[in-house]
Image (cartoon, rainbow, N blue to C red):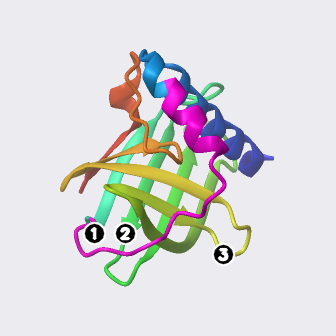
């Protein structure tokens, strides 16, 4: 149940990023990108940051989602999400990550095929994003950033 809730929350966040862009040309670009059926090449780059990133993401029905993401140089990751104030609210996943586009990281969970995206802001911070790398511009934007530990 919690995993489904996390997936729904991540999907809602991605939709919020797209909807709250505040720029109609971004929406048109997103629409055009979504209708494009060509496959984007996935590469791994040494320019992607490695290390441990932490932060507390917004949560609709809890105090927040304490998140720890470990990115390793061998393109593997560990993601730990703890729903604050919730019993049995800890979820851990591991998998591989790739660079999808300039400064866009795609996390892939091999067991489910689930994908999560983070945009690299700089060497010490990344932001939960959608598959297009859209940065949240809304009031809660700072709460979607994970900082390097």
Q: What residue range appears in magenta?
A: 27-48
The residue positioned farthest toward the left in the image shown: 123
Residue identifier under label 1: 50
SS label for mark 2: strand
| C-beta proximity under 8 Å, tags 1 and 3 | no
Q: Residue at x 45, y 27 (%)?
A: 26
Q: Residue at x 39, y 15 (%)?
A: 139
**In-image side of 144 versus 53 (left or right):** right
Residue 135 x/y as whole percent: 39, 34
Q: CA distance from mark 1 to mark 3?
A: 20 Å
Q: Does the image show residue 6?
A: yes
SS label for mark 3: loop
Q: CA distance from mark 2 to mark 3?
A: 16 Å
| C-beta proximity under 8 Å, tags 1 and 2 | yes
SS label for mark 1: loop
Tell me if residue 31 is in the magenta stretch: yes
Quadrant in which residue 90 is drawn: bottom right
Q: CA distance from mark 1 to mark 2?
A: 5 Å
**In-image side of 19 versus 145 (left or right):** right
Q: Which mark is residue 110?
A: 3
Residue identifier under label 2: 71
| First reached walking from the N terminus: tag 1 or tag 2 | 1
The answer to whether 112 is drawn above or below residue 140 in the figure is below
């Amino acid at each position: 149940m919690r995993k489904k809730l996390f997936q729904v929350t991540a999907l809602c966040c991605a939709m919020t990023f797209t909807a709250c862009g505040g720029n109609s040309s971004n929406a048109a670009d997103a629409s055009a990108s979504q209708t494009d059926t060509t496959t984007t090449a996935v590469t791994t780059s040494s320019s992607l940051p490695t290390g441990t990133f932490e932060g507390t993401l917004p949560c609709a029905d809890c105090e927040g989602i304490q998140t720890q993401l470990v990115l390793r140089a061998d393109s593997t990751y560990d993601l730990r999400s703890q729903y604050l104030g919730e019993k049995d609210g800890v979820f851990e996943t591991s998998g591989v990550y790739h660079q999808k586009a300039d400064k866009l990281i795609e996390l892939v969970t091999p067991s489910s095929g689930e994908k999560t995206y983070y945009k690299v802001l700089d060497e010490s911070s990344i932001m939960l994003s959608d598959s297009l790398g859209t940065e949240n511009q809304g009031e809660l934007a700072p709460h979607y950033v994970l900082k390097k530990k």
